[in-house]
Image (cartoon, rainbow, N blue to C red):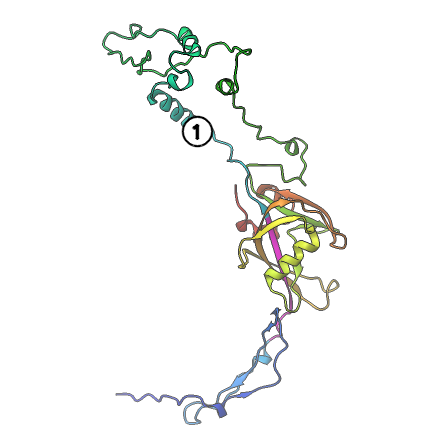
């Protein structure tokens, strides 16, 4: 039977710091991260004495921490129906009319009134003789329930018409799903694309990667949510009623700076939070650096941003 040596546990005097603490590389609010190196010595009879230093590894890269905002307007109306859905709902509607109970004439035209006599005078007489001989008529209240009931309304007597009777003839006309903002291609309006989710995209005064979601650097003592609230106020003004969906970031994007553009940081890391707008208008503020903005759908955003940025943000956006 072979004997195996088990080394004794480390003691406090066996651990020593090697070199100074490395410079913090990332921070958010009051939190900072640093690195330290330590060596552990074991008995000379088992392993030779060694020292491992993290400080000998390449220096960590410093990135600027930023908080971004995915501000969206939820759909106002239901989505447009597909041809299959239209056929299905039309079938269900006709089936309901076929199986429904007889038109409640006694409710709209009380028995013994002049309106009831006028209504009865224009109704077609149903006897069931126009159907095949083997089909048994099912006539109830002058209606053959084997087919859809057709109700004929008498001509309107405008002179004697009351407010209640006018409701019978009132025709419900839904408003158009196409708004003025759609016809004019007004991308700054929240009244466009009522059946789709719209997202706020802002444009900065630069040649490359001008269009992005709004973002700002996280200052000392700030959280991601605190920075997002400050960002919304400094860029779009106070005339908006918004709601932050969650404190957890929904998307993340990282990009590197060119050496000649920034000497302090190697790049930026942006954590995006989701928010919804219920009322108000986004008005670019002076000093925000925003030269233009647009409310766009997910499909439209893809044509405004570069490929790498789209790959980071696509999964956080709604298809509808």
Pinpoint residue 215: horizontal percent, then vertical percent: 65, 56
Crowding around mark 1 (Cα neighbors within 10 Å: few <14, some 14 to 19, many 20+) is few
Residue 65 part of the magenta segment? yes
Tell me where residue 56 appears, x and y as whole percent. Answer: 59, 80
Instruction: Please tell me which residue is depicted at 61% across the width and 81% down the height of the picture.
Output: 21
Q: Is residue 22 above or below residue 152?
A: below
Question: Quick check: can you spot residue 305?
Answer: no
Residue 214 visible in the displayed image? yes
How far across and down, in percent of the image, does residue 137 sit? 26, 11
Q: Is residue 313 above or below residue 140?
A: below
Q: Residue furthest front?
A: 112
Q: Quadrant of residue 94?
A: top left
Tell me the element at label 1: helix
Q: Quadrant of the N terminus?
A: bottom left
Whether 138 is among the magenta residues is no
Nearest the viewer among 238 and 118 is 118
Give the farthest residue toward the right.
286
Q: Which residue is mark 1?
A: 84
Q: Which residues are magenta?
A: 58-71
Residue 187 image-quadrant placement: top right
Residue in the image at 47% along x and 31% along y: 82
Looking at the picture, tell me which residue is in the foreground, 170 or 149.
170
From the viewer's perspective, is residue 94 above or below residue 3? above
């Amino acid at each position: 039977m072979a004997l195996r040596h088990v080394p004794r546990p480390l003691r406090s005097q066996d651990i020593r710091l090697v070199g100074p603490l490395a410079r913090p590389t990332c921070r958010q609010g009051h939190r900072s991260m640093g690195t330290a190196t330590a060596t552990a010595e074991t008995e000379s009879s088992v392993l030779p004495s060694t020292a491992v230093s993290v400080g000998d590894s390449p220096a960590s890269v410093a990135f600027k921490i930023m908080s971004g905002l995915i501000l969206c307007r939820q759909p106002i109306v239901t989505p447009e129906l597909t041809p299959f859905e239209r056929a299905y709902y039309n079938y269900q509607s006709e089936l309901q009319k076929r199986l429904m109970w007889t038109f409640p004439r006694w409710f709209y035209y009380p028995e013994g009134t002049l309106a009831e006599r006028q209504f009865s005078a224009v109704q077609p007489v149903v006897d069931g003789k126009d159907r095949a001989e083997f089909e048994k008529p099912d006539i109830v209240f002058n209606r053959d329930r084997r087919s859809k009931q057709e109700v004929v309304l008498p001509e309107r007597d405008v002179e004697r018409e009351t407010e209640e009777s006018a409701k019978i003839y009132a025709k419900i006309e839904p408003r158009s799903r196409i708004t003025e903002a759609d016809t004019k291609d007004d991308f700054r309006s929240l009244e466009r694309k009522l059946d789709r989710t719209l997202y706020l995209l802002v444009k900065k005064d630069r040649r490359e990667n001008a269009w992005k979601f709004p973002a700002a650097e996280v200052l000392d003592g700030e959280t991601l949510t605190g920075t997002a609230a400050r960002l919304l106020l400094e860029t779009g003004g106070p005339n908006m009623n918004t709601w932050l969906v969650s404190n957890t970031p929904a998307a993340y994007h990282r990009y590197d700076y060119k050496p000649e553009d920034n000497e302090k940081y190697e790049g930026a890391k942006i954590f995006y939070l989701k928010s919804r707008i219920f009322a108000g208008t986004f008005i670019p503020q002076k000093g925000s650096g925003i030269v233009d903005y647009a409310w766009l759908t997910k499909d439209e955003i893809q044509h405004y941003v570069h490929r790498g940025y789209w790959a980071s943000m696509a999964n956080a956006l709604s298809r509808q």
